[in-house]
Image: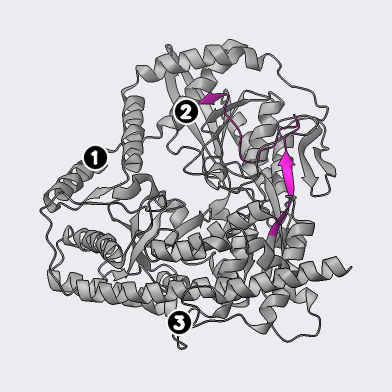
Amino acid sequence: MVNRFFKVLFSLFVLIVLIFSVPGFSGIPDEIRLEPQAQHRRVEQIITQLLFKKHYKKADLDDSLSVQIYNNYIDALDGNRMYFLESDIKSFKDFRLKMDDLVKAGKLEIPFEIYNRFRVRFDERMDYIQRRLDQPFEFTSDEKFYPDRTKMPWAGSTAGLDEIWQLRLKNDYLVQKLNDKPDDKIRESLKKRYENITKRIHQYRSEDVFQFYMNAISETFDPHTNYFSPRAKENFNIRMSNALEGIGALLSTEDDYTKIVEIIPGGPADKSGILKPDDRIIGVAQGLDGEFVDVIGWRIDDVVQLIRGPRQTIVRLQILAAVDGAGARPKVIELVRDKVILADSAADSDTLIFKENGKDHKVGVITIPSFYFDFEAMSKGDPNFQSTSRDVTRLLAELQSAGVEGIIIDLRNNGGGFLSEAITLTGLFIDQGPVVQVRDMENKVKVENDFNAGVIYAGPLAVVVNRFSASASEIFAAAIQDYQRGLILGEQTFGKGTVQTAMDLNKYFPGSEEQYGQLKYTIAKFYRVNGGSTQHLGVIPDIEFPEVFQPSEVGEGASPNALLWDEINLVQFNKMNPKLSTLIPRLEKEHAVRINQSPEFQDYLTQIHEMRGEREKKWVSLNEAERRREKDSAKVKEDDTDPEDVVLNESGRILADFVMLSGQ
């Protein structure tokens, strides 16, 4: 007992020494210093207890986790290495292995002091920017700007940071100059942009810093585990309720940019077919002729208010497409504001009619944007309430009446939805049996079954997926593949195979009038009936099409702390077409021959190759003449782009080949 007492006493002494040994601890001006509030220690204790006792991932609070927490926190403050100096990082190095001790002791002083140092460096940068924008720029040299500095060394001096920021400012300036904006307007615009960034950072309060730190801890478990401060929780709920109005997209902030997180099926953004997750919004304009407002550096809530407006009015967005990489050029899209209506996001059908090997073919296509269920209408007794499975049942009957020889289920860009609907939909194509397994943090496995005997459609089937097919989409595609019920075509899917729950932290403080925020954390994992997880790996198609994005760029695999793939015991199920796998090599061969002879598909491959090249290019030229040539070339390519859906057309031909080879 005595030894334990002295051990604890010594640990506290070390922590006190660490806290007061932070260089510059007493050099932070009082007017900008932020300190932890009294309730933060209590909230931290609850959060860490929940994470280490209830999260699906079993983790030890040790030096290894300490390094991850430290790295996450530094990345949250300055992930692009644009503010801290190398000397700052060296002065923090002793904390890399002490973050676990801080968490155990409930000490928050060091994370706040790291933030306060960041705030000093931030203000230094903003002062430099305003001075530099008063000076001229030249664009005739061969300088290069690297937007992504996450892997680059920290600047060794203030002069080094000045050089980094000068290149960034030159690129900011050149982007507007290429749009033929007058110099005085460019300077005015950029000064205002960085004033907005300054205003946003200066509005941070203690709860914001606490949220950064708590997320540095929570995201060591997995990327879907997050803490929301009371204000963030309120704003998130507002954004979620407003997500069904405006443009139908969920937004977040990353490195001063407003980024698309999710496209709501059936909304204006979805219908445009242009906006994609990870695209960045840099400007917003009202109507057809309103002037663009630069929103780089704006608070997310202010951007949302600017984008929202009366229904049936036009908003124009200036975006940088994620697919274009570092050299992305601004594109303008027009959207008509509207409320997302379930009918607009409902499954829909069409037919592909084509000639192959001298024979006419008709293939039915059912596009499912999400797995939906109108619970409110059902509760009110509406016999015509909508759900994915009900709508697809109707569409299958219509297509079969139209004499199609096979059905394609198009799940591209389907981010998921109701798990129950994915299970019921699977039941339309398989006889009763297991569809998915769910294992919780106590290793208890629950099997979700389709209990309906028989099938609604027994004919030839293909499912088309891409990198943005996630969650419930992956469960459906995996079941169809495991049962060998149909062909899976397209790209490797996202790999989102986890289940989250949200915990209101006020539950742990009964009677308190304070607000404590919310913790979202992972509680379970999905597994296929063959025992393999859909997590991280996703679903690998039977016949893979060229990928626009690599797994390291988009998908669960792009997150460093994502839970990994593993497997459990399979469950008994009856394969419906055991011969299907024997036909795949022949189908692949026919597919390869056909796309090699198809000018349309070869153009598609060229576009993918060029887009990959753009994303792999980590720098942009700061030479105006070179950038204008690039802009003109990109405009010509845009004008020549054929909107034909070559992936869907080729999928139809593969299904027609399957019908012929299988004798169906």
Find numbered disc 2 in the image and state the secondary structure of the residue it sits on.
loop
- The span from disc 3 to disc 2 (Cα, nearest Å) is 56 Å
- Residue 513 has which mark? none
Q: What amino acid type should be assigned to the residue bearing mark 1?
A: Lys
Q: Is residue 491 visible?
A: yes
Q: Locate residue 537 relative to residue 445 in the image: left or right.
A: left
Q: Locate residue 131 relative to residue 416 in the image: left or right.
A: left
Question: Nearest the camera: 122 or 655?
Answer: 122
Query: Which residue matches tag 2?
Result: 545
The quarter of the image holding the N terminus is bottom right
Question: Nearest the camera: 379 or 15?
Answer: 15
Q: What amino acid type should be assigned to the residue bearing mark 3?
A: Ile
Point 14% across, 53% down: residue: 624
| Residue 375 drawn above or below residue 604 | below
- How many residues crowd around disc 2 within 10 Å: few (fewer than 14), some, or many (20 or more)? some
- The span from disc 3 to disc 1 (Cα, nearest Å) is 52 Å
Q: What amino acid type should be assigned to the residue bearing mark 2?
A: Phe
Query: Which residue matches tag 3?
Result: 28
Magenta span main SS: loop
